[in-house]
Amino acid sequence: MTVEEMAGSCRAPSAEAAGEARRRWDSIAKPLHGLGLLEDALVKVCAVSGDPDCPLSPRAVAVFCADNGVVAQGVTQTGQEVTAVVAGNMTRGDTSVCRMAALAGARVVPVDVGMVQRPGLPGLLDRSQGPGTADITKGPAMTREQLRGAMEAGYRLALELAGEGCRLLAAGEMGIGNTTTSSAVASVLLGVPAETVTGRGAGLSSEGLRRKIAAIRRAVEVNRPRPGDPAEVLRTVGGFDIAAMTGFYLGASAAGVPVILDGFISAAAALAAFRLAPLSREGMIASHCSGEPGARLLLEALGLSPVITAGLCLGEGTGAVALMPLLDMAAAVYHEMSTFGEIRIEAYKPQE
């Protein structure tokens, strides 16, 4: 599939299902909009799925694992071997997102979209587009064919999970150096300087942060990506994981399945998806706002409000998974609580 075909397949939400869900919320014997953003999230689930019964299960989180050539510029604390180690642990259920997903009732689907080391483990989907991207300070991260392949890998996985019955999806990532590539993508798409959106990632020193910002500046200067061409931004200064997540968000929209965003890297991919296909945003739910400097700017550009405020910055999809039990609690109120009519109390009315 072409990038244009993926973008063109996104679906509009159901205004009818959204209206029915909002009426249900307003009929429940509690203060109007008392559950705030949780109510809005469930209305979005109903609208995107076209089902006012608000399906939230089965659910899955896809974790896209890839390496980034920009680590050669000293922008990370650790080497690329860590990506493969964590991906391997994920296949054994031994990472943060796996432990959290087990409690949240979500399936974890780790995907190799371009790691340098290829462990080839059972349970690790092989969608590799190459042994990591090129160093973005010296030229484009990937070829056009690699970009298309990475996006299609994410897109088709979303369709596959929806076809297996998933009614709620999330995406995470694992890849040493990917806060550098996501900061580069954010800098270009938002039209702001590198230092505005670049943080310490997994604990860089002040000198490491200076190297990281300098690397992003060089990458943008060398590649000159156009902000109005999000696919080209991903190709030149992004990563396989970010491209795959972008495709995943487009695929979720095409399948009519709501998708929960994770943190900064996830939001950078989401903004790329939104710029490619504005309809894709209609199915996105922001779980939290990462501690990375550019996270709030990305969510503002998307027009999304994060539900959780907890200072999360772990990645892997952990923030997205953390939201799932909260949605379940809101759904219990939505489905099971009495209405004003049932308890014979006059309903609350909006006041000016």
Image: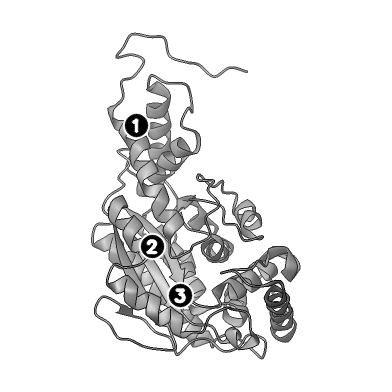
Rendered position, 183 above or below 126: above
- Quarter assignment of residue 222: bottom right
- Judge by depth and name the residue closer to the eye, 139 or 307: 307
The residue where tag 3 is placed is 151
**Labels 1 and 2 touching (C-beta < 8 A):** no
The secondary structure type at the circle numbered 1 is helix
Marks 1 and 3, how far apart at CA: 36 Å
Q: Position of residue 245 (x, y in %)?
A: 46, 68
- In the rendered structure, the answer to whether residue 154 lies left or right of residue 338 reads right
Q: Check residue 96 in the rendering and tell me which mark sits there, or answer none.
A: 2
- Nearer-N-terminus badge (1/3): 3
Q: Position of residue 84 (x, y in %)?
A: 40, 81
**Kind of residue indicated by mark 3:** Met
Residue in view at x 34 percent, y 19 percent: 339
- Judge by depth and name the residue closer to the eye, 225 or 254: 225
The residue where tag 1 is placed is 334
Residue in view at x 42 percent, y 76 percent: 65
Residue 121 visible from this viewpoint: yes
User: Quarter of the image containing the N terminus?
Assistant: bottom left
| Foreground disc of the pair 2, 3 | 2
- Quarter assignment of residue 154: bottom left
The secondary structure type at the circle numbered 3 is helix
Residue in view at x 39 percent, y 22 percent: 27
> Quick one: which residue is furthest to the front in this view?
205
- Nearer-N-terminus badge (1/2): 2
Marks 2 and 3, how far apart at CA: 25 Å
**Labels 1 and 3 touching (C-beta < 8 A):** no
User: Quarter of the image containing the C terminus?
Assistant: top right
**Kind of residue indicated by mark 1:** Tyr
Marks 1 and 2, how far apart at CA: 30 Å
Rendered position, 235 above or below 265: below
The secondary structure type at the circle numbered 2 is helix
